[in-house]
Amino acid sequence: MTEQGPRDDAFMQHQRGTLTPEMRREKAEILEIPVKQIDLETAVSAADLVEAFSGASIQARNVGMCAKVYERMLTDPGRPTIYLGLAGPLIAAGLRKVIRDLVAAGMVDVIVSTGAILFQDFYQSRGYNHFRGDPDRADDARNADLMVDRIYDTYVDEEKFWECDCWIGRFADDLEPGRYSTRSFLQALGRTIEDPHSILGTAARLGVPVFCPAIADSSIGIGLTNHYRRCTEENREGVVIDVIRDNYEITQTLVKSPATAAAYIAGGVPKNYINDAVVMSYVFQHDTPGHRYAFQLTADAPHWGGLSGSTLKEATSWGKIDRKATHAMAFIEPSVSLPLVAAHVLGRQAAGNRSRLRFSWQEDRLLLIESERQQ
């Protein structure tokens, strides 16, 4: 190796002379925290690994930071109401029990989901499965002949989808006719589910409200369309889903909470809906400061200007995230990032003795929210 010569020494002395004492102090602050190298000899569990991520860089650090934000939500003595937004092919990806376990552990207070996720949870609760496929070798024209539907590298049985659609329509036939929010309808549907690994069934059993603002855009909506057709042809009243009632109901959960927090898995309608509940609070003459904590796991990028990839910092401009909020984002597809974050908070038992919330509803009115110790 070539040794440093006199000319090099002179040049470096010159460079050092260009930095004032104040600039050196500023430089020392910038270079204060070193990146920690991940040590797999000490990170022996998933929770340990995610903890190690928070000291690393790039998206590993972001995953670690999201886990820490979630942990702070759960341990905040102010007991913020935690909203979980769910979008994307999460059930097809194999995350059904991961989500269900977060609900069962008291780490989720309100769920906002796409209809596809809730329908596929219901589909599995009926004993049907998702199956592994191959996107490169799939013959989709032949799959259509065989009534096999493809979700990237996953297959589902379209005949069983139809069967579940029809079951939901017949279930609606047996309900008292009238206007339902998606929360009240899904609670009734969830009570029919015996599968202990079901998200809907667990939420119904524990009284966790589930909202699905775009329910028509799903197989649940198809089942309800089947119900509507019968009601129309038989000239009788039936179940009507009122999504504006959803707005009215979810906003009440927010204005009656001392503080709120949000966990966005992917983006889409659920992300915006949880955020819009903050905006809608003025309907109740309530000045809401925005979510105290928030994190998002998404594969979407912010520079396209779309909602799913928009940053939580951007949401601050709308008043949806509090100016002083603790927030983080990890730009990693949720089938990888969500199990890691969930493993961290579950492994650390971050909910501890966190109380559960009991929501007392009278039709569309939320009478009160009470805290009760977990059983």
Image: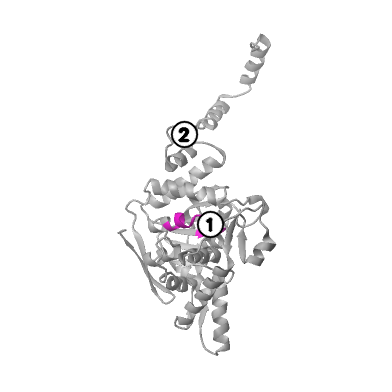
Q: How far across and down, in percent of the image, does residue 284 sit?
A: 47, 70
Q: How far across and down, in percent of the image, does residue 176 sit?
A: 44, 82
Residue at x-position 42% and y-position 77%: 363
How crowded pointer 2 is (Cα within 10 Å; few <14, some 14-19, many 20+) is rated as few
Q: Which residue is mark 1?
A: 90
Farthest-out residue, top: 6
Q: Is residue 93 magenta?
A: yes
Callout 2: SS: loop
Residue at x-position 46% and y-position 59%: 83
Callout 1: SS: loop
In this view, 171 is above or below 305: below
Q: Which quadrant is home to the C terminus?
A: bottom left
- What is the number of the mark on residue 40? 2
Q: Front-most of 295 and 136?
A: 136
Farthest-out residue, bottom: 235
How crowded pointer 1 is (Cα within 10 Å; few <14, some 14-19, many 20+) is rated as many
Q: Front-most of 318 and 231?
A: 231
The amino acid type, in three-letter code, at marker 1 is Leu
Which is nearer the N-term, disc 2 or disc 1? 2
Q: Which quadrant is home to the N terminus?
A: top right
User: Which segment is the magenta one?
Assistant: 85-100
In this view, 335 is above or below 142: above
In this rendering, position of residue 129 left or right of residue 188 = right
Which image quadrant for residue 215?
bottom right
Q: How far across and down, in percent of the image, does residue 246 sit?
A: 50, 71
- Figure disc tally: 2
User: How is this picture coloured?
Assistant: one colour
